[in-house]
Image (cartoon, rainbow, N blue to C red):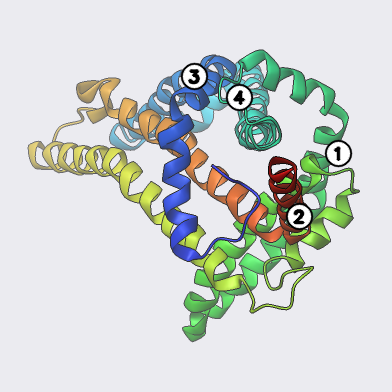
Amino acid sequence: MEFYKKRDFGAMISDTFQFFKENGKNYFKNYFLLNGLLLILLMVIVVFGYRELFSQIFDANTEGQNYFFQQYFQENTIVLVIVCLFVLFLFLAVSVINYSYPVFYLKRLSETGDKNIKADQILGDMKRNGKRMAILFLGLFFVVSPLALILIGISYLLIFIIIGLLVLLFVMPTLMNVVNFLLYDFLHTKKGFFESLSYAVRSQFSYSHQREKSPFWKYWGSTTIMYIIIQVITSIFTTIPLFMIMFSAFTVKEKGGNENPFDSLGIMFFVFYGLAILMSLILSNIIYVNSGLLYYDSRTDLHRDKNLEEIDTIGTHAI
């Protein structure tokens, strides 16, 4: 697959799935080698943590103990703080790998053409770029996130005058593209954080080296389609437990008893939520790979370099 080339909207979608058709086995094998254990730990904590939390809430409500939930937190403060810190660290580790892995994989594949990429090669790329990754995620947290929250907040406020729904529909995929372009550009080049951020924003609306129509709609549309696909798949795992809790709550109410539905349903109730989170993290690779193709589409400066290389190669063969 050629990476640095212009693509129309249809090619953005089809080439994303073509990528996984050609490289999916190697891609996900390395992904699970690097991130699999962290994902399993995260899922286990979510399943047992949510079960314990909601069980305490339900017990407090059904047994008429107004301060039961507050007492539970007071008696387990140290344990809860340790668990929260561990979950935060685990979530950050998963996020770093989940965001950076597709970038380094596509970078290595586009530069070398080697389809037999090893997990230790990607891990080596991450280690060599550790300092830049630290700068990147600090910038995302302290610069991009506050600005994004302000923009999203304004969009939500505009919902009260209806137009906000339309604004939000355009803002969310665009913000997602800006963040992903920032990731790709910062880790593909030697630019500074703000220089890459500037490129990530500008490239959503125009090509830097060519006077062509804005790529905004094909970028926005491609990301929106991928996001819808992911949400449809993950909704399967969230809809089932939703019906389970509604049915259980209705049954308890009809019987008039104090039975805790979380005890009767057991751990299987929250396994579905854990699977939904797990599937969402795994399927997010579709958006990240798609964003990589969008980024390569925007790098028209490298398109020309690629064409010149091909012309030189043709000339060499002709001689």
Which mark is nearer the camera, 4 or 1? Answer: 1
Q: Nearer the viewer, residue 71 or 237?
A: 237
Can you give x and y, in whole percent of width and height, for residue 4 in the image?
Answer: 66, 50
Please state which of the two labelled residues, at mark 3 or mark 4, is closer to the viewer. 3
Mark 1 or mark 3, which has the lower sequence index? 3
- Residue tagged 1: 135
Q: Residue at x 22, y 29 (%)?
A: 261
Above or below, 265 relative to 176: above
Amino acid beneath label 3:
Lys
For the N terminus, the image quarter is top right
Q: Give the CA separation, mark 3 to mark 2.
A: 31 Å
- Quote the CA–CA distance across marks 2 and 1: 12 Å
Give left or right: position of 270 versus 240: right
Q: Nearer the viewer, mark 4 or mark 2?
A: 2
Residue 21 in sight in this render: yes
| Mark number, residue 29 | 3
Q: Report the mark closest to the observer, 3 or 2.
A: 3
**Position of residue 120 measured from the top left corner of the image (x, y, whole percent):** 67, 13
Where residue 12 appears, x then y in whole percent? 50, 56
Mark positioned earlier in the residue sequence (3 or 2): 3
Residue for point 58% across, 75% down: 157
Q: Say whether marks 3 and 2 touch (CB < 8 Å).
A: no
The amino acid beneath tag 2 is Val
Q: Which mark is residue 144?
A: 2
For marks 2 and 1, the one nearer the N-term is 1
Q: Quadrant of residue 196?
A: bottom right
Precedes in sequence: disc 4 or disc 2: 4
- Relative side of 268 to 168, left or right: left
Q: Amino acid at mark 1?
A: Ile
